[in-house]
Amino acid sequence: MQIVLYCRCCSLQCAGRCVRIDIMTILIFVAVLVVLILIHELGHFIFAKIFGVRVDEFGIGYPPKAMKLAKFAGTEYTLNWLPFGGFVRLFGENQSKEQLSKEEKQVSFEYKKPYQKILILFAGAFFNFLLGWFLFAFVFYSGMPLFWDKNYVENARIVVTDTKVGSPAQIAGIKQGDILEDLYLSSSVKIRPKLMSPDFVASFIAKHTGESLSFKIKTKDGKEELLKITPAQGILDSSPSSGAVGVEMTLVSNKSFGVIESLWLGFKSSLSVSWDVLKGLAMLVKNTLTLHMDLSHVAGPVGIASMVGQAASVGFVYLLYFMALISVNLAVINLLPVPALDGGRIVFVIYEWIFAKKAPAWLENGLNIVGFVMLILLMLLITYHDIARLLHS
């Protein structure tokens, strides 16, 4: 599933090129993905139960089946070998009505009223939206790491979001999540902290290309280090002649809100993200139709895994914030009227509701296949683009 996200990097202006993958990043990404998909499937599960649909299986992960965890109220709960999410298997979902007995019809998805089917299909995206909302609210309540474009913000800190492979910064030992506290000239002249914005630092580095600078860094475990780094040319892809050290930075300050305000801000954030996703998708479609496809702001599994790793490197609260972003993305994308997605299935239910008959099976199956193939091709294209960014970052 493609996710429309926007990368916030300052000194390298990476435009989505900052892709880093390691084992811990992969593990965190899988954990995030499992939670998001299980919440999605839980929505389908709960609403199916509300409307009396028999749920034959609720699976954690995807088949093949590893083990049966339990069976309760007619539902088998299973653990499966592919740890990338989960699924619910509704009775009668893909079964002909003529094959069912009277008792089976009462618990069959196919025999439920159109509005009940729509709500069951809609519930997955709705639960993703709710998860995003409450994660946003929790982050605002616990102390939101706000990202600023201003030159100076009270109590703000400069956080390293990435370092370029083979750059002076990486060689010196600067890592994701490090905090840049002070900057010194070789003469030990300290740069005043109130001037320590990413824009100022990038400009100062460029002015002192070839000179030895000292960076005072606080690592994620609280240790302070003084690292000597010499800016060099040829590091910035956008401006090879400008001096740089190969570090991406953002200005972060924490601010917490009350419960009610956090819930309101979380809801507003969810709506804002939803609107941004729709605008991003509309622009993607427009550019594709005009043969100007731009994937610089689109990420697939590889790109998202990298962004999850960067979010985790900044802090747990920001990881939750990023998880909220992805959850709302999933909610919006799953409701698109595209065959093979929940939104596409809802369209067929609405057709059945209006015309009092199901769409021809050949049409529904054919469109689902076409939609599925298009999604897979788009995913492959986005993944290729992600890997290309990884190799050239």
Image (tube, helix red, strand yellow):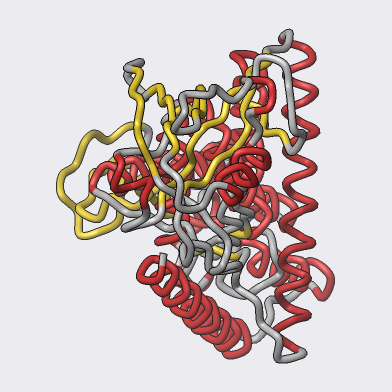
Q: Position of residue 225 (x, y in %)?
A: 33, 23
Left/right of residue 108 with respect to residue 261 in the rendered view: left
- Please determine whether, in this image, residue 243 is positioned above or below residue 241: above
Furthest residue to the front? 187
- Please determine whether, in this image, residue 36 is positioned above or below residue 375: above
Q: Position of residue 334 (x, y in %)?
A: 62, 59
Look at 40% across and 71% down and name the residue there.
Answer: 392
Look at 63% across and 29% down and name the residue there.
Answer: 196
Viewer-side residue, 214 vs 134: 214
Furthest residue to the top? 258
Viewer-side residue, 132 vs 284: 284
Viewer-side residue, 20 vs 82: 20
* Count of numbered labels shown in the rendering: 0
Look at 42% across and 30% down and name the residue there.
Answer: 178
Residue 145 visible at all: yes
Left/right of residue 217 with respect to residue 78 in the rendered view: right
The answer to which quarter of the image holds residue 64 is bottom left
Look at 78% across and 12% down and name the residue there.
Answer: 260
Residue 92 visible at all: no
Furthest residue to the left? 66
Quarter of the image for the C terminus: give it. bottom left
Q: Position of residue 166 (x, y in %)?
A: 31, 58
Left/right of residue 309 with respect to residue 159 in the rendered view: left
